[in-house]
Amino acid sequence: MYKTGAHKAQIRMSSLADLPAAASVLIEAAGQEPIILFEGSMGAGKTTLIKEICSQLGVQENVNSPTFALVNEYEAADGNLIYHFDFYRINEEREALDIGALEYFESGRLCLIEWPSMIPNLLPEHYLLVELQPAADGEVRTMTINQV
């Protein structure tokens, strides 16, 4: 589904208290990479992690998953725009094209993309892939970050 890339980091989060540190590591790992893909099962914590990332970037608006709108726009403290996508409910890639996904991806702005597996042919050549995996107990989560 994705190209393999160099392994960057793997972080275990045993509770929500670990979320700020994990988000901080992710922001640092992203550096100048504007495209971050979030993959994981339903309830793995993708939106929760994105909320924390946005909080650390100074977003004042309410951050929630754009499940039906497909994309939400937020403004960071530095005035830069952040685009948050959720492609879970699309039936075909054409729906992402219809909202201008490629233009967003090429904007140079931070794009946080949930369920990128729904648009495999539209993904840019380079991105940061974040995979979230909950443990069997549902409490511990592992976040793996790969640069592709």
Image (spheres, rainbow, N blue to C red):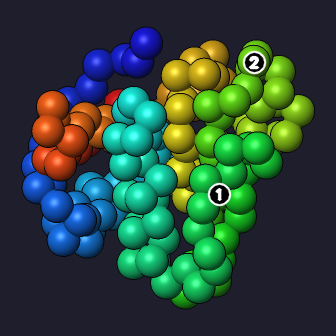
- Residue at screen point 83% across, 21% down: 94
- Three-letter code, disc 2: Asn
- Three-letter code, disc 1: Tyr
Q: Is residue 44 visible?
A: yes
- Residue at screen point 66% across, 71% down: 74
- Residue at screen point 65% across, 57% down: 83
In the drawing, does residue 128 fall left or right of residue 115? left
Classify 112 as above or below 16. Answer: above
List the residue tagged with mark 1: 83
The one nearer the camera, 90 or 10, is 90
Place residue 102 in its image quadrant: top right
Q: Is residue 128 visible?
A: no
List the residue tagged with mark 2: 91
Q: Quadrant of the N terminus?
A: top left
In the drawing, does residue 141 fall left or right of residue 128? left
Find out whether the residues at labels 1 and 2 contact each other: C-beta distance under 8 Å: no
The one nearer the camera, 121 or 42, is 42
Place residue 29 in its image quadrant: bottom left
* Marks 1, 2: nearer the viewer: 2
Q: Secondary structure at mark 1?
A: strand
